[in-house]
Image (cartoon, rainbow, N blue to C red):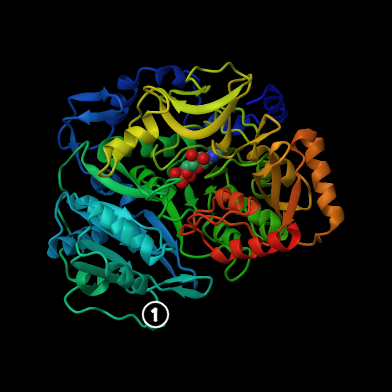
Amino acid sequence: MSDETIANLLNEERTFPPSDAFRAQANVSDPDIYEQGRDLEKFWGDYAEGFEWFRKWDTVLEWDPPFAKWFQGGQLNITVNCIDRHLNGPRRNKAAFIWEGEPGDQRVLTFADLHREVCQAANALKSLGVKKGDRVTIYLGMVPELPIAMLACARIGAAHSVIFGGFSPDAIAERVQDSESNLVITADGGWRKGGVVPLKANTDEALRSCPTVKNVIVVQRVGSAANCKMKDGRDHWWQDLVRDQPRTCPPEPMDSEDLLYILYTSGTTGKPKGIAHTTAGYLMGTARTFEWVFDAKEDDVYWCTADIGWVTGHSYIVYGPLANGATGVMYEGAPDHPRRDRFWDIVEKYRVSLFYTAPTAIRTFMRWGDSFPNGRDLSSLRLLGSVGEPINPEAWMWYHQVIGKERCPIVDTWWQTETGAIMIAPLPGLTVAKPGSATRPLPGVDADVVDQDGNSVPLGSGGFLVLRQPWPSMLRTIYGDPQRYRDVYWSRFENLYFAGDGCKRDTDGDYWLLGRVDDVMLVSGHNISTMEVESALVDHPAVAEAAVVGKAHEIKGQGVAAFVTLRSGHALSHDMREELREHVARKIGAIARPDEVYFSAELPKTRSGKIMRRLLRDIADGRALGDTTTLADPNVVKKLRDQYESTEG
Ligand code: 6R9
């Protein structure tokens, strides 16, 4: 990356130290913790002592790069640590989940309720022949049966493979086949924006090409609205199967390194990667980061708005919070159903104190306007989190002012499906936050930024983000394909984990994530991160969201194409286009001035809310569109392409 580019990226000078009041009560306030994190074995061995084990480990870490074994020789069950452990004290009747359905129905599950329901579901799985070592696919919406099903699998030693409820039959089939699941748990349907997602019908279609599946368990969620057909001998209603099962189920003793789950994440090419997580290390990683990064206390009400179909939901709706005995809110539906203040309504109603969401959601709320959050009482909030994409400074400031009322620390958390737990983030009682920076690697995380040849770059420069040491919650392999695991993550640089993200470090040593490394443009020989131009665009008051891609350009090699959505109340016009081009030139420099600006009502996003720049590149270069199966709304791309073709010539 050119020095000029880096200099531009470093011009964010606002800093936000923790308030004295927050610092005084924080879970972590001694900076020595970073030093302690250097001795990995002591750091994690001491922490693991606080959990329940059937048998203690012999070694904390065995590292045979790129294969790590944590807590080898130990035996435990993750559900004992997430549930049973809390039953002999005041947490017994504390809410584990406060669930709200999209239509407005509610359920509260205490830890004692959760224990009973998980045990009954585990016994139901056993009654259908599921045993330790099997894989179970779960394809559900955000209903309580989703975490219950995951925990029921873990109770008996089966690995779960959760598929996001928005995926298509083809995507389900591919994942069921790869994991060789013999049982699928789904629902008749799920509620979304007042309509029904046909979960069972999608499952039926997928299973035509999945001979390994012998049984399907179907949660009744939408009733007659789904008009769901059951297949004799294969399909069982959850409610009928579970109701009369015994209310206890002995936890299966699992080796530390036994497979806990597989979660598929899309590769840029080829079939999705089945990221494999194991038991003990994953528990330690998610539990500790939850306590530290979110500063979770016994009486907090925590809400992570992610879907459990993504890793954020696995680690920070299910395992991390439960391991800490926390109360978590779970919401089934859309943020604008029935109105655009649904999230703030939920915060007000349950007095949510810790709130964790994604930049794409924050930018959407910005576009909708301040009146929605301002119409609700948000005074219960005390900490805000962000995950999933780089958060541009403008969105950070809006989150800080309009949602946090300048009172709540913001934790911008960088991590991946592969890392299992948060890796780079502020410790909210210690770290001086900067809008747009995920700040520092957490204690025990050995991150670095390196150049093409794997050499560490000096502070103030950019390069590739890598991890130098193993960590407990790291992926162990790609399911069924250890060679691909080596190739994707460990062969770009010798003995370094290659995260695939660009990153710069400022002179204070703070990390600024720049997006995936393929999101970099080469304009007249200058490396310009798409993220940087997007930030400049979103900084303009009329812009709600922007996606920027490089486009083949005769003279410059690559030119800059910007796709922009405007905030409510702003009209698109030729003047606006010129104004935005000049705005970027002013913020970054003439080199980054977009050659083309396209206005669009929406941007193409994956179902987890990440902008798919790859498709925009295809549009900008007039190529055939690549794989669109992970798009949330394929029509968005079609509209963009039509518009592009009609304006280009
Ligand atoms: C947790 C999750 C991983 C990719 C990752 C990076 C991007 C996530 C980020 C962030 C900048 C953050 N990413 N958090 N970029 N700042 N705070 O999202 O996992 O779905 O596997 O995505 O998301 O590019 O490499 P996953």
Q: Does residue 10 appear to the left or right of 485 in the view shown?
A: right
Q: Quadrant of the C terminus?
A: bottom right
Q: Which residue is mark 1?
A: 226
Relative to 39, say whether 595 is above or below.
below
Figure disc tally:
1
Residue 357 position within the rendered picture, expressed as x and y whole percent measured from the top left: 54, 49
Q: Secondary structure at mark 1?
A: loop
Residue 600 position within the rendered picture, expressed as x and y whole percent measured from the top left: 69, 60
Relative to 56, say whether 624 is above or below.
below
Q: Residue at x 32, y 26 (%)?
A: 44
Which of the 4 image quarters holds residue 486? Answer: top left
Disc 1: residue Cβ within 8 A of ligand 1's nearest atom: no
Relative to 452, say whether 633 is above or below.
below
Circle 1 residues within 10 Å: few <14, some 14–19, many ≥20: some
Q: Nearer the viewer, residue 334 or 583?
A: 583
Q: Quadrant of the N terminus?
A: top right
Q: Residue at x 28, y 58 (%)?
A: 176
As shown in the figure, which amino acid type bears the numbered disc 1? Ala
Q: Nearer the viewer, residue 216 or 43?
A: 216
Which of the 4 image quarters holds residue 2? Answer: top right
Residue ranking furthest to the front: 554
Residue 566 position within the rendered picture, expressed as x and y whole percent measured from the top left: 74, 57
Q: Residue at x 71, y 30 (%)?
A: 12
Which of the 4 image quarters holds residue 479? Answer: top left
Can residue 294 be seen in the rendering of this structure?
no
Residue 531 position within the rendered picture, expressed as x and y whole percent measured from the top left: 64, 40
Can residue 559 be seen in the rendering of this structure?
yes
Q: Does residue 85 appear to the left or right of 605 in the view shown?
A: left
Residue ranking furthest to the right: 575
